Image (cartoon, helix red, strand yellow):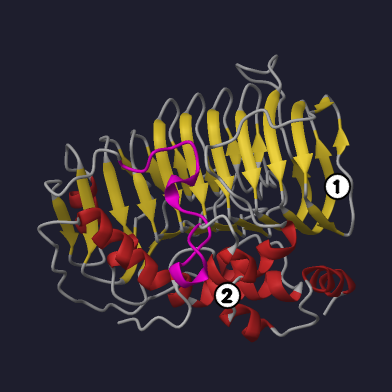
Amino acid sequence: MTHNRRQFMRAIGIGTIGSSALLAADSAAAADDSGRNGSSAGSHFDPDDGFADAAPWLNDDTPVYKVTEPTREALEDAVHRSGPRVVVFETSGTIDLGMESLEVTDDKCWIAGQTAPSPGVTLVRGGLYIEANDCVVQHLRVRPGDAGAEEGDDWEPDAMHTGDDTRNNVIDHCSTSWAVDETLSVGYRTRNTTVSNCIIAEALNDSSHTKGEHGYGTLVGDCAKNVTMVGNVWAHNTGRNPAPKGGTTTVIANNVIYHATDWITSFGGPGECEDTPARSAVENNAYVRIGSHYIQFGHVYYEGNYTAPETPPAAVDERLSQRPLWPEGLALLPASAVMEHQSTYGGARPADRTDQDQRIIANVINGTGEIIDSQEEVGGYPNLTVNNRSLNVPEGGLRQWLESHAKRVEQPGAELR
């Protein structure tokens, strides 16, 4: 165990507890006096905790479309329906996107990866792009990888992103890795976007990107407003962990940022809103094993954060004395609690993690792991077991039914099948 890791564990107050105990533990701080969730109900953070309103269109008459086999065609058929819709899974497995990213282009789509039987669903060799409004994506894993491409082959996928000019989208409890461009990003000029409880990790650093080394985590595009990033884990991305650009307003709170060459609070720079500073509330995050730590072209309220080693941010523009924005009702954990919390509840199906997510979380806990250039350095693309089961969609209480499936795959020790 590294010195930095021991220092962090002492700060948390749990000594040098082993990783297996941490992974099984509930977050003691999650059952705070705010009356929210609590560890018995999964993560401290809900999809509605940001500025986005998670699927206000959902009702008991919303059509439900079932994915019955782990193929691009089956998933695409369900996703590309028009009108309000819920996509559920009667199959597990690896879905090969065939080096063509899958776009959600019609508004009001809820993709519920939590409904899949164990071990869930992973998309490979392509990204999932939300090019629509009022969407929710939960409990999916997306790992594009290099797909054997080389620089100049025009292979530069994100793992996930919301499209430019979209609004009111939620990405919750997803695991994204092995992107060639950014790993999970928010589009330009977007409104009311929430990214919560996700693992955003192992961007491929020196892969097929035309710019060369490009191992980046998250970009918040120019002029994006009311972006909430809460309860996430960024790990093994060289930069943009995350990086809001000019004219953005962002809440970055209760995240773990682990092993980065640099961490940029506000990116700024050339772009359509380059003359307007990014405005961010950056609170109660844990920065561990990072290099340079700076605020660039931004106005930032920076409070309650923990860094190991201690690296005060260098403010280029302005450090704010109060929050520039905040979602109503969002209550935070102390920075000392977030590593344990995300170790237990972060990413897709945290009670049913695949080898890839288990390894990434173990890296964060133990202070291990490296920046990678290809998925082949960490075992290659997964080949998940294909299991099938029938889902009985209720005639009433559809939202509650989806939430019950989510809690089932989020609670440690849950009985899964």
Q: Residue at coordinates 54% horizontally, 58% vertically from top-left? A: 177
Q: Which mark is residue 26?
A: 2
Quadrant location of the C terminus? bottom left
Q: Helix or strand or loop: what does disc 2 sit on?
A: loop
Front residue of 228 and 97: 228
The quarter holding residue 339 reads bottom right
Q: Please count the marks in the image.
A: 2
Q: Which mark is residue 292?
A: 1
| 329 in relation to 342, above or below | above
Q: Residue at coordinates 85% horizontally, 47% vertically from top-left? A: 292
Q: Amino acid at mark 2?
A: Asp
Q: Helix or strand or loop: what does disc 1 sit on?
A: strand
Q: Is residue 271 left or right of residue 380?
A: right
Q: Residue at coordinates 66% horizontally, 62% vertically from top-left? A: 338
Question: In this picture, which residue range is highlighted in magenta?
Answer: 36-55
Front residue of 119 and 150: 119
The quarter holding residue 275 reads top right
Can residue 374 be seen here? The reply is yes
Horizontal and vertical percent position of residue 406: 36, 64
Q: Nearer the viewer, mark 2 or mark 1?
A: 2
Q: Is residue 36 left or right of residue 248?
A: left
Give the class, few, some or many, for how many residues have Cα within 10 Å of label 2's Cα (few <14, many ≥20): many
Q: Report the predominant secondary structure element of the magenta stretch.
A: loop
Contact check, label 2 and label 1, Cβ < 8 Å: no
Q: Residue at coordinates 57% horizontally, 70% vertically from top-left? A: 376
**Is residue 363 a member of the stretch shown in magenta?**
no
Horizontal and vertical percent position of residue 399: 26, 54
Front residue of 74 and 134: 134
Quadrant location of the N terminus? bottom right
Q: Amino acid at mark 1?
A: Ser
Q: Which mark is residue 395?
A: none
